Amino acid sequence: MIAFGAFPGNPSARLPLTAMHFRKPFPPSLPVLTFAIASFAVASAPLPAAAVAVELPERAPLPSAAPAPPPPEPKPGDLRQAAIPIPQPRPPRADRLPQKPREPREPFGPPAPPKMLPDPRSDAVRPARMPPAEVACRNRLEALGAAFQEAAPEVSADGCALPFPIKLSRLSKSVGVEPDAIVNCATAEATARFAADVVAPAARSTFGQDLAGIVQASAYVCRPRNGTRKLSEHAFGNALDIAGFALAKGKAIDVEPAPPEENAKFLMLVRKAACGPFKTVLGPGSDADHARHLHLDLAPRRNGGTFCQ
């Protein structure tokens, strides 16, 4: 190792120090001490004149304002999203004509039924006391053995009206009605007499059995005639649809377009005899709506005529 030290008599001179300047050999820690002394001497020495005259290069002027710091990095789990620009609508074209406003759509579901035509019977008013004609009709029903109960009056804004309905459960002591039928008293009496005078004898002559009951498909219903706006006779409790007959020994006879031969004979006798006691008689063959029942009603007709098909 070479060290530098001051020369005696000239402090500014720096000469290398070698081992010959020391009379004793270097101790083990002396090289480190010698290097430290030499480093201090070099650091404290004055700079040469040429070094002092050196000028530093000019620095670029600092900007007037510091640039904005970059946005912070999103942290894990930060669910905030950058704002999405909303697209602006296109301006209307000058060559495009204005469109007509759309008509409002009808609500979903079946269209409302057309308003029914008025009927003189729609204005029927239920008086406080039952009219004598209604009382007399009920007395005749009881004499025939029919079973019935008074029912609540039926009145509708559509014109349907049944001020004095009855709930008919039996036509006689031996002939029932299934299910119970809501009709006016005149229809109940006509049906009871028809069963006793026509249906029961036809059952005995054709099958050798007594009539046990009838199966009704429709009685009072507030509706128009099919395909028209005119109120049906059902809307006044003035009609009864018979779908079948029951005999005492369990035989059932259904009204249908092509019944068995024996049943067809019985149904033909009943259907022909009904034209007279009832003003309207419709059944299989007249139209599709009456293919599986006999429609019987007391609709008033001119000169007391009938309509049977």
Image (spheres, grey):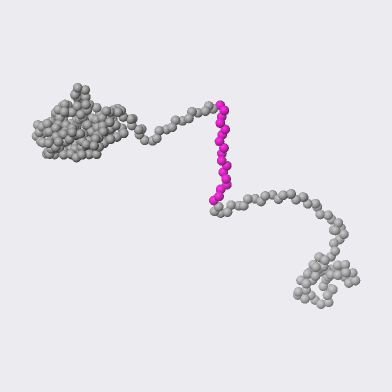
Quadrant containing the N terminus in the rendered view: bottom right
Q: Quadrant of residue 21?
A: bottom right
- Magenta stretch in the rendered image: 79-95
Q: Quadrant of residue 299?
A: top left
> What residue is drawn where x is 42% and y is 33%?
105
Q: Position of residue 136 (x, y in %)?
A: 16, 34
Q: Is residue 39 magenta?
A: no
Q: Residue furthest bottom?
A: 24
Front-most of 110 and 81? 110
Q: Looking at the image, can residue 90 be seen?
A: yes
Q: Looking at the image, can residue 235 be seen?
A: no
Q: Position of residue 2 (x, y in %)?
A: 81, 68
Front-most of 181 and 141? 141
Q: Position of residue 43 (x, y in %)?
A: 81, 65
Q: Quadrant of residue 50?
A: bottom right
Q: Position of residue 57 (x, y in %)?
A: 80, 52
Above or below for 134 versus 64: above
Dominant secondary structure of the magenta stretch?
loop
Front-most of 102 and 264? 102
Q: Is residue 94 magenta?
A: yes
Front-most of 264 and 199? 199
> What residue is drawn where x is 67% and y is 49%?
68
> What residue is drawn where x is 31% and y is 32%?
158
Q: Residue furthest top?
A: 303
Direction from residue 122 to residue 50 in the image, left or right: right
> What residue is drawn where x is 80% and y is 51%?
58
Quadrant containing the C terminus in the rendered view: top left
Direction from residue 2 to residue 120 in the image, left or right: left
